[in-house]
Image (tube, grey):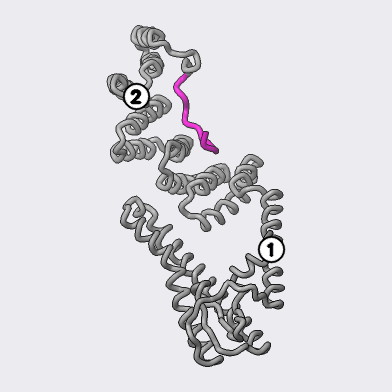
């Protein structure tokens, strides 16, 4: 029964296995670009040549790795993050995916050409050949490989301990905010907004911390960033929080302008109706009862065709509250009865909610 040494098998397929000696006394150097191809010399390399080759290959591979990482960094931070919205276009998305796939191949091909020039200049002419999957294991290279494997496992273990002890950056930010350590929360979220600038949660958390730290304008700007980046069912949280800050600052005119802009530019009819309902509640909370009544009248008519975003029974119940503020008690009583006739659950029988600042998505 054949036994397989996993460590030796990994070594044979790793960059550490950079040369092989055949039974016929030939030395084959593994290609940097293709692990299945190599450069054949009709002689056995000396120990000095092997040690020199080992150092050179390490440098070439390090250069390749750094070049690939830097290129990806430039691609992500100079093209992907700044023009994130363009990725809604499938052609742009496809082009970037192709670029990501091709980058390492192009860089490795270029580095390989320089490597070929180097070995030709220092070791003479070679013949391109297949790199053999032989049983040849060079002692020093195998020792280096095991050391590198050990480093990887130590690094993974260390990162695991760090993650366990520190926790996720998101949870850390949440905990700092809950503890009232807003300055520290702003620092943490700022760092992560630089690392992943297209993730809205860092702007949202930083905005919350900025508000309680007294930077209201900064909080509004961050909620705007989070709103632009977010594109799911919780997107409205950032918009609602921005409205709350303007409500807190008594900047009602600006808040209503924000409502109108969002309502005008929203393509989805359901989301538009939801925003109109939020605006009606806002008008009630700032004492614009007549304008709120006009909007509730319109929403109740629309609720017949929108059973998802507009709850007819709740709209009647809220309009009753508007009628009471306008001293129209008969109309208020009729609306309350209509809400009951529409089976208004007891949990919905509460006052029109005031704007609030929300920390986390529910």
Mark 1 lies on residue = 5
Residue drawn where x is 36% and y is 30% of the image: 274
Relative to 147, residue 54 above or below: below
- Report the magenta residues as a range: 351-362
Mark 1, Cα crowd under 10 Å, few <14 / some 14-19 / many 20+, is few
Q: Is residue 49 visible?
A: yes
Residue drawn where x is 31% and y is 21% of the image: 303
Q: Is residue 329 left or right of residue 64?
A: left
Q: Is residue 355 magenta?
A: yes
Residue sitting farthest toward the front = 1
**Quarter in which the N terminus is drawn:** bottom right
Relative to 213, residue 127 above or below: below
Mark 2 lies on residue = 292
Question: Along the line of sight, which residue is nearer the eye, 202 or 63?
Answer: 63
Q: In whole angstroms, how far apart are the C-alphas of marks 1 and 2?
A: 77 Å
Residue 170 is situated, as x and y percent measured from the top left of the image, at: 59, 46
Residue 358 is situated, as x and y percent measured from the top left of the image, at: 52, 36
Residue 25 is situated, as x and y percent measured from the top left of the image, at: 61, 86
């Amino acid at each position: 029964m054949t036994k397989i040494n996993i460590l030796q098998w990994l070594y044979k397929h790793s960059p550490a296995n950079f040369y092989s000696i055949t039974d016929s006394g030939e030395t084959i150097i593994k290609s940097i670009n293709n692990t299945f191809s190599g450069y054949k010399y009709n002689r056995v390399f000396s120990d000095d040549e092997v040690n020199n080759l080992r150092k050179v290959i390490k440098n070439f591979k390090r250069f390749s790795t750094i070049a690939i990482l830097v290129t990806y960094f430039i691609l992500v931070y100079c093209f992907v993050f700044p023009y994130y919205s363009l990725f809604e276009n499938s052609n742009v998305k496809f082009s970037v995916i192709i670029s990501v796939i091709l980058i390492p191949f192009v860089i490795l091909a270029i580095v390989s050409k320089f490597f070929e020039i180097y070995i030709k200049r220092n070791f003479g002419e070679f013949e391109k050949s297949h790199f053999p999957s032989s049983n040849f294991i060079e002692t020093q290279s195998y020792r280096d490989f095991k050391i590198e494997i050990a480093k990887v496992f130590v690094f993974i273990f260390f990162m695991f301990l760090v993650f366990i002890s520190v926790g996720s950056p998101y949870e850390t930010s949440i905990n700092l905010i809950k503890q009232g350590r807003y300055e520290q929360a702003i620092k943490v979220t700022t760092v992560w907004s630089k690392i992943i600038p297209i993730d809205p949660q860092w702007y949202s958390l930083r905005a919350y911390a900025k508000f309680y730290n007294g930077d209201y304008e900064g909080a509004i700007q961050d909620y705007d960033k989070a709103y632009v980046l977010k594109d799911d069912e919780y997107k409205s949280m950032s918009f609602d929080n921005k409205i709350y800050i303007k409500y807190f600052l008594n900047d009602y005119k600006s808040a209503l302008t924000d409502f109108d802009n969002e309502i005008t530019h929203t393509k989805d009819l359901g989301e538009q109706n939801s925003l109109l309902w939020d605006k009606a509640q806002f008008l009630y909370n700032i004492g614009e009862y007549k304008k709120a009544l006009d909007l509730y009248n319109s929403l109740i008519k629309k609720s017949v065709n929108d059973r998802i975003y507009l709850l007819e029974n709740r709209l009647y119940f809220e309009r009753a509250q508007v009628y009471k503020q306008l001293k129209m008690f008969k109309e208020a009583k009729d609306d309350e009865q209509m809400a009951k006739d529409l089976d208004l659950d007891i949990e919905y029988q509460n006052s029109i909610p005031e704007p609030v600042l929300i920390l986390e998505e529910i």
